[in-house]
Amino acid sequence: MQQKEANQLCSMTEAETHSLWTKDYLRAWSCNFLIFFAFMMVTPLLPLYMKDSFGADKHLIGMVLSGYTLTALVSRSIGGFLVDSLPRKLVLTVSWIGFSLFFAGYYITTSLALFAIVRTLHGIPFATTCVSNSTVAIDVTHPTRRAEGIGLYGLSNNLSTAIAPMVGLYIYEVWHSFDLIFGLALGSALLGTLLASTINLRKRDIVPNRKPISLDRFFLIKGWSQGVCIACFATAYGVLATYLAIYCKEQMGNASVSGNFFLIIALGLMCSRLIGSRTLRQGKIVENATFGVAFSVLGYGSFALWHNEWSCYACAVIVGLGNGHMFPAFSNMFVNLAPSNQRGTANATLLTMWDVGMGLGIVLGGFLAEHYGYEWAFYLSAFAQFFGMLFYFALAKGRYIKQRLTEH
């Protein structure tokens, strides 16, 4: 025990000699904030946009919005392949340009069919931008600060998740202008494109002697059990992220409740990540994952049972604290299961399984909401989180402990 504590202390001392918040890490962190600021400003309001502009019902909303997730799902693996096979700065820049341009496409969506096409295709650059940006963030982080850096990198997601929905909902309620919302998202994406172009990366040798096309270049096979867990957790979140705003407007008569929910959950995420960053630096990845998974189940289960405004906010706190420990831990698991020349694939696998879950949450949640009511959609959310917890304890936790790489 004393030897273990001495090793942890030595590791922390070495980590503290290397700065985490370098200029390039801060740029990658800020770019990630801008990706999700643009994304989260638009996404929670799209069900309202489709209903107000095209008269779409709940089931049709779910089907149309799932197209974005499906293209992102396919593109994640391709993005990981490209990031590991081509210069990462090139992939990052091209992805950002495409991600930005599609926001301008929302201005020409004069019909539901055209909107569905633009929204679906937008999933391609979104997926590759997320994969390339997160991989670049890992590359510019010193190995001794990597676990902590991965955890704090997600703070940018949380901060944008706290701010963007509130900004979008405020614009919707005050000006009822989707054009203004789309324009602000476009501006955020263009700023991210400019900032990404300033990140400095060391020249990286492309690893030769690998088969041109093989499954492990698109999917981290060793991480499949962690991927199942992530898919379950994403299903749970996908229901809330997609249908909470329209539920609050129709059932509670106050769409701003969903904005407050996203704010509280994001604040919980940020606090939890800051608390967990020190234990991640100590290598306590499994401990963080275990706490986060168990706590998140409590939050989603409570949300499924109580649907008034204050219980909604209480559940947001619990989910935020749980997810803030859980997601950085799982991100580290994927990275620690992959050699350095497969970091893009590892990130792509995590995000691909997230897209699988989000897609299931959107489609199944829309079906249940249309035919049985929103309560059943929220039951689905709780069940998915509970199943993910069971799978984690039964299989994923043990497989990670056996297969993780200590030096990579």
Image (tube, rainbow, N blue to C red):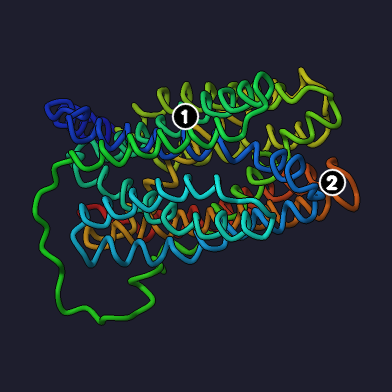
The image shows residue 55 at horizontal and vertical percentages of 80, 47
The image shows residue 110 at horizontal and vertical percentages of 65, 51
Front residue of 143/185: it is: 185
Task: Say if 144 sits above or below 92 in the image.
Answer: above
The image shows residue 372 at horizontal and vertical percentages of 90, 49
- Residue 160 is tagged as 1
The residue sitting at 84% across, 24% down in the picture is 253
Front residue of 133/235: it is: 133
* Label located before the other in sequence (2 or 1): 1
Q: Is residue 46 left or right of residue 333?
A: right
Q: Is residue 337 left or right of residue 397?
A: left
Whole-angstrom CA distance, mark 2 to mark 1, is 29 Å
Going by the numbered disc 1, the residue's amino acid type is Ser
Q: Quadrant of residue 41?
A: top right
The residue sitting at 76% across, 36% down in the picture is 246
Residue beneath disc 2:
376
Q: Quadrant of residue 248?
A: top right
The image shows residue 402 at horizontal and vertical percentages of 38, 59
The residue sitting at 40% across, 34% down in the picture is 187
Q: Quadrant of the N terminus?
A: top left
Task: Say if 295 sits above or below 113 in the image.
Answer: above
- Residue 275 is tagged as none
The residue sitting at 47% across, 31% down in the picture is 184
SS state under label 2 = helix
Q: Is residue 230 left or right of residue 132?
A: right
Q: Quadrant of residue 339?
A: bottom left
Q: Quadrant of the C terminus?
A: bottom left
Q: Is residue 203 left or right of residue 52?
A: left
Count the numbered circles shown: 2
